[in-house]
Image (spheres, helix red, strand yellow):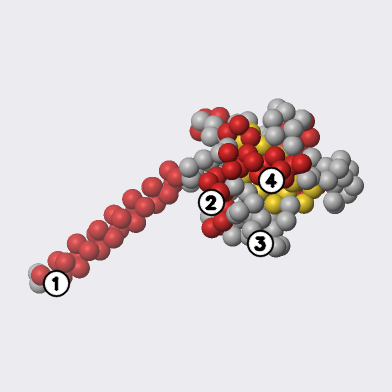
């Protein structure tokens, strides 16, 4: 058999093996999951605290997830800045003020002091400052530079004072059109002020 024929056969065999290996790897990384509450397909994971162990993250469909988040956001006794998700960066993970760098804590305190008494959407009591994150780049620098020098650097990126109900409505609208799922989402808990985003210190 000519040498080039042997090369072609070997190459084809390697391609088949590689495709099979890739399929197995993808299956391990993206297993089919169903909602732990209702059994429908689930693309998002819910946890009670940030960076939870894999076994403590519960797969939920959007409807069941929103019910859990509704309880978290409504029962939360503090106030928080909520950062809208952007491409390449996950969001909707609550971390208290004590977790963040000095730059973020400083901006958090000043922004929450500026939160209006009433929700700008419905007029109910405001509790959250919603920030539209326009691009992934500035968001990635948030832990180091703070909120004002990253997310609020542009004239259009101004925070909106919202109540728990209207904050949840915006979160639900985003999750309903989200193509890929978020591995971990957790709502605010306790009474300490904080930031809802997907970035950890040092990222």
Q: Which mark is residue 154?
A: 3
Q: CA distance from mark 1 to mark 2?
A: 52 Å
Whether residue 182 is visible to the viewer of this picture, yes or no, is: no
Viewer-closest of 39 and 67: 67
Look at the numbered disc 1 and give the secondary structure of its residue: helix
Judging by the rendered image, the residue that carries numbered circle 4 is 82
Residue at 42% across / 49% down in the picture? 26
Instruction: Estimate how packed mark 4 is, as few (under 14), some (14 to 19) or many (20 or more) residues with alpha carbons within 10 Å.
Output: many
Q: Give percent across and percent down for residue 106.
A: 64, 41
Residue at 69% across / 58% down in the picture? 157
Instruction: Estimate how packed mark 1 is, as few (under 14), some (14 to 19) or many (20 or more) residues with alpha carbons within 10 Å.
Output: few
Look at the numbered disc 4 and give the secondary structure of its residue: strand
Judging by the rendered image, the residue that carries numbered circle 1 is 4
Whether residue 16 is visible to the viewer of this picture, yes or no, is: yes
Residue at 52% across / 40% down in the picture? 201
N-terminal of the pair, mark 2 or mark 4, is 4
The reply to whether the C-beta atoms of the residues labelled 1 and 2 are less than 8 Å apart is no
User: Could you tell whether 22 is left or right of 45 in the image?
Assistant: left
Viewer-closest of 46 and 105: 105
Q: CA distance from mark 2 to mark 3?
A: 15 Å
In the displayed structure, 117 sits above or below 120; it is above
Q: Quadrant of residue 99?
A: top right
Question: Is the N terminus in the top left, top right, bottom left or bottom right quadrant?
Answer: bottom left
User: Residue furthest toward the right?
Assistant: 123
């Amino acid at each position: 058999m000519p040498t080039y024929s042997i090369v072609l056969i070997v190459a084809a065999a390697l391609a088949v093996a590689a495709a099979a290996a890739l399929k197995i790897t993808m299956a391990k990384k993206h297993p089919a999951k169903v909602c732990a509450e209702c059994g429908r397909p689930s693309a998002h994971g819910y946890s009670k605290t940030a960076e939870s162990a894999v076994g403590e993250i519960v797969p939920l469909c959007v409807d069941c997830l929103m019910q859990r988040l509704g309880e978290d956001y409504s029962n939360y006794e503090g106030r928080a800045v909520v950062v809208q998700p952007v491409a390449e960066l996950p969001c909707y993970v609550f971390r208290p003020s004590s977790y963040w760098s000095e730059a973020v804590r400083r901006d958090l305190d000043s922004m929450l002091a500026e939160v209006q008494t009433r929700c700008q959407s419905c007029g109910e009591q405001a509790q959250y400052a919603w920030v539209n994150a326009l691009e992934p780049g500035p968001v990635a620098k948030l832990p180091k530079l703070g909120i004002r020098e990253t997310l609020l650097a542009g004239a259009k990126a101004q925070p909106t004072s919202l109540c728990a109900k209207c904050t949840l409505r915006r979160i639900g609208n985003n999750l309903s059109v989200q193509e890929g799922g978020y591995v971990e989402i957790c709502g605010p808990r306790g009474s300490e002020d904080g930031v809802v985003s997907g970035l950890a210190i040092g990222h």
